[in-house]
Image (cartoon, helix red, strand yellow):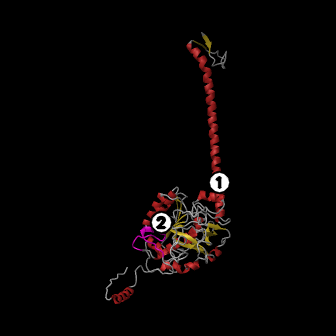
Amino acid sequence: MTVRSSATPRGARPDGVPAPVLRGPRAAAALITAPLWAVVRRAAVRQAAVRRAAVRHAAVGRAAVRQAVVRRAAVRQAVVRRAAVGRAAVRPVAVRGTVAPGGRGSVAVRRVVAAVVAGVLVVLVSGGPARADEARERQWFWGPLEVAKAQRITKGAGVTVAVLDTGVDARHPDLRGAVLPGRQTVQNKPAGNDDGVGHGTGIAGIIGGRGHGSGDGVLGIAPEAKILPVRPVNDSYFVAQGIRYAVAQGAKVINMSFETRASESLRAALREAAAADVVLVGAAGNEGDKGNEQEYPSAYPEVLTVGALQRNNKIAPFSNHGPQVDLAAPGVEIPAPAPEGRYVTLEGSSAAAAIVSGSAALIRAEHPDLSAAEVVARLTGTAIDRGAKGRDDFYGAGQLDLMAALTAPQPAASSSPPAGANGQTAPNGQAAAPRPPDSTADDGGGLPPLLFVAIGVVLLVVAGGVVLVLRRR
């Protein structure tokens, strides 16, 4: 059989040469497969074109997604920044301190901040001090705490206070020269010397603000202390890493004005910090009138947990209460620096914790030989009793008395390991027992020797010569 291949047109080829004539089995196979190969080639060409188009569309889509993410981040930062400067009243809830706010603000703002930080226990009040010359005048708590008197003794030089929060704006006039290079624990890289939210900057200013000019700006409790900014996210693992980093950098006080979930890694980091002789200070929370759930890390016994006081020395209604509360400090209408050289007024246990952290820094500077447990014992043991007599779940040991804690003649800590101020074990296993109402810090001994002698004489007379051997405790 003789056939002509269908791979070429009938008749002559394009060049005019007659088409070859195929004979035999190969001719039959070519007649069958040639059209199939043509179809396959056309399909391959179409598929390649489709792939190229898909790649182009994917690239465009990825670019669009990146642009959308950038736009959303810009919107988020704008909303958070607006809240941080007090243009809207926002009471963060889950965010006590960093890292994600929560509380009584709008749901939209709360979700935005929650995505950025981790639980800011603070209220950013509108109408706060807008100028540096107003900020100093509004530091009302200086009088009750006798801060000026304390700063004539020490200003905290030589002590590093780590602020685990949203970062710190080191460019603020009140913080220039006070802020060490910081760390961001998610990617474990240098960061933290800026603050897109504002909470960390405010906390740092309350602790170690230096003011500026002639009496302008916020002056912190310990203005010569160094601030170490550590920026985690609202995840207990990264918070634990931040605590370890602060300890490794030599921080003697760690302020934790935030809330995160409880975890073994977080608890382990707190134990390591306590064993490393670090004072751990945490905010009690701002949900005392809304659920009053225990918040971590402040609910752990290694942390000195601080509630917020009003101007009248009564506990603020929003301040969380419970057996975890160790101490109370001013926490309403607290002026603080904010990013971009601005100022806000803070309310919440975040601010109260910052005041106690600054106080701990002063004690550590003046008494460098004291252990962290002894510093905590001074703070709780010299507190002014408020509320129910003795320790209670609202005030803990009582109201912070900075001068008494700073000038107490001897540590109030016991050598035995009884419960701490909140009925739990204090750092390093030492006691942090509250001082009885209206009492003063003692020298760690028992009754005076002359009193023992007098008691012995009386007993001898009454008992007819019974000799009692009394030993000083």
- Give percent across and percent down for residue 276: 43, 66
- The residue lying at 33 percent from left, 84 percent from top is 468
Element type where label 2 sits in the image = loop
State left or right for residue 457 relative to residue 123: left
Q: Quadrant of residue 367?
A: bottom left
Residue 251 pos. (x, y %): 48, 67
Q: Earlier along the polypeptide chain: callout 2 or callout 1? A: 1
Q: Helix, strand or loop at disc 1?
A: helix
Of 456 and 365, the residue lying toward us: 456
Number of numbered labels in the structure image: 2
Q: Nearer the viewer, mark 2 or mark 1?
A: 2
> Is residue 358 something that shows in the picture?
yes
Q: CA distance from mark 2 to mark 1?
A: 40 Å
Instruction: Tell me which amino acid carries mark 1.
Output: Arg
Q: Please, what is the dominant secondary structure of the magenta stretch?
A: loop
Residue 418 located left or right of residue 135: left
Magenta extent? 414-434
Above or below, 6 against 66 in this view is: above
Label 1: few (<14), some (14–19) or many (≥20) C-alpha neighbours in 10 Å: few
Mark identifier at residue 72: 1
Compared with 86, 449 (above or below) is below
How dense is the environment of label 2, judged by Cα within 10 Å: few (below 14), some, or many (20 and up)?
many
The outermost residue toward the front is: 463
Name the spot of residue 127 as percent of width and height, x first: 68, 70
Residue 423 within the magenta-colored segment of the rendering: yes
Residue position marked by numbered label 2 in the rendering: 301
Amino acid type shown at disc 2: Pro
Residue at the outermost top position: 1
- Residue 341 belongs to the span the image colors magenta: no
Is any part of residue 169 visible from this angle?
A: no
